[in-house]
Image (cartoon, helix red, strand yellow):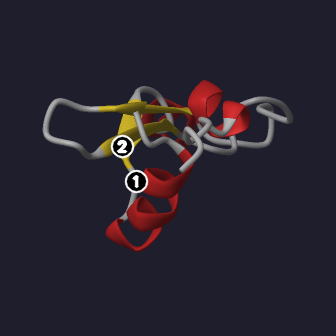
Amino acid sequence: MPKLKTHRGAAKRFKKTGTGKFKRGSAFKQHILTSKTRSRKRKLKGSTIVSPADTAKLRRMMPN
């Protein structure tokens, strides 16, 4: 059985937490920020947990 390789694109975008969940950054905060309200931009700060529906895919992409 060959070694499993980590998906490098996923590794750069997601981090595994201590409990095995995945953290991700918020989308929609890179450009065209002038049309977005202050409160909306504030809420996009920080990181969130990946939804359970996508966690199985990520577990396969990041085995380590």
SS under mark 1: loop
> Is the residue 12 above or below the residue 51 in the image?
above
Pick the residue in front: 51 or 42: 51
Residue 29 in sight in this render:
no
x and y percentages locating residue 33 in the rendered image: 77, 32
> Is the residue 4 above or below the residue 38 in the image?
below
Task: Identify residue for label 1.
Answer: 50
User: Is 33 left, or right, of 25 in this rendering?
Assistant: right
x and y percentages locating residue 36 in the rendered image: 70, 42
Pick the residue in front: 5 or 35: 5
Label 1 crowd (10 A; few <14 / some 14-19 / many >=20): some
> Is the residue 13 above or below the residue 28 in the image?
above
Label 2 crowd (10 A; few <14 / some 14-19 / many >=20): many
Q: Amino acid at mark 1?
A: Val
Q: Quadrant of residue 20?
A: top left
Pick the residue in front: 14 or 49: 14
Q: Residue at x 66, y 39 (%)?
A: 7
* Mark 2 in CB contact with mark 1 (< 8 angstroms): yes
